[in-house]
Amino acid sequence: QLQLQESGPGLVKPSETLSLTCTVSGGSISSSSYYWGWIRQPPGKGLEWIGSIYNSGSTYYNPSLKSRVTISGDTSKNQFSLELDSVTAADTAVYYCARVPPGSSHYFDYWGQGTLVTVSS
Amino acid sequence: EIVMTQSPATLSVSPGERATLSCRASQSVGSNLAWYQQKPGQAPRLLISGASTRATGIPARFSGSGSGTEFTLTISSLQSEDFAVYYCQQYNNWPPWTFGQGTKVEIK
């Protein structure tokens, strides 16, 4: 059974970098069949795709966040990570990691439980 | 960017009744449309992909239809566990992949 688990600081100061890690169990992020993505949800609001990584190397970002986002993979730990630079209060959200199933269809079939990150001084 | 618009924002339905949720895309997305269910404090759960294909383990009372720009999620007979927020997502044109703003299904 595939499981994803987000981890990282729950509080980040404005202008600093938000860093989160998604640990995958029950499957390998190095498999060439899957994309792995990050999605966020501000409190009481809808979902926003942040970006995805494929085969631990190729990355694809939301243009609205591209200048501040880096997604990377660590196959030795079966993890992939999110860094978001220069955060503001608008980046306060629950951050989810998720898997895209095999094929060219970029929807998300497995999700982590999510982690709330608050941007505040 | 493709904008996904869901209606209504809130749908009040009695248990056992049918619920019909709409999702409209600002341009054609073919059949590249997914539906998710989200309960308070939980991650979204995939219900439907390809506009009409139920995900593994999803009850038959959930059905999806539509193509192009107009899509519908129907819950044929609402159970207590179905009261939640539902999101559509297009995955035809990127970047970015985009979600609707959600429809909350509440108990009438």
Image (spheres, grey):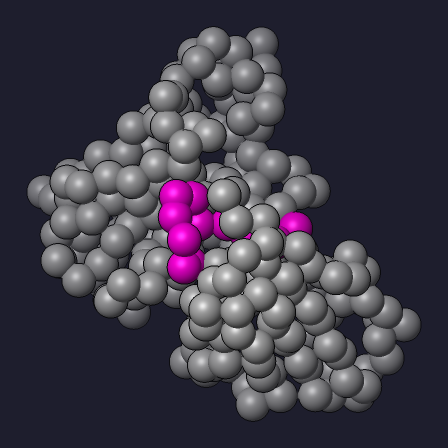
Q: Main secondary structure of the magenta part?
A: loop
Single out the residue that lies furthest toward the right.
B108
Image position, residue B108 (x, y; %): 90, 72
Q: Looking at the image, which is closer to me, B61 or A13? A: B61
Q: Residue at x 67, y 80 (%)?
A: B74
Q: Looking at the image, which is closer to me, A96 or B63? A: B63
Q: Residue at x 57, y 28 (%)?
A: A92
- Report which quarter residue A84 is drawn in: top left
Q: Is residue A6 visible?
A: no
Q: Is residue B65 above or below residue A105?
A: below
Q: Is residue A49 above or below residue B44?
A: above
Image position, residue A47 (x, y; %): 56, 47
Q: Is residue A101 visible?
A: yes
Q: Is residue B94 magenta?
A: yes
Residue range in magenta is B91-101
Taking the image as shown, residue B31 lies to the left or right of residue B36, namely left
Q: Looking at the image, which is closer to me, B105 or A94? A: B105
Image position, residue A118 (x, y; %): 56, 25
State the quadrant of the C terminus of chain A.
top right
Q: Residue at x 17, y 62 (%)?
A: A33
Q: Is residue A88 magenta?
A: no
Q: Residue at x 77, y 84 (%)?
A: B18
Q: Looking at the image, which is closer to me, B64 or A34? A: B64
Image position, residue B36 (x, y; %): 55, 65
State the quadrant of the N terminus of chain A.
bottom left
Taking the image as shown, residue A3 lies to the left or right of residue A9, namely left
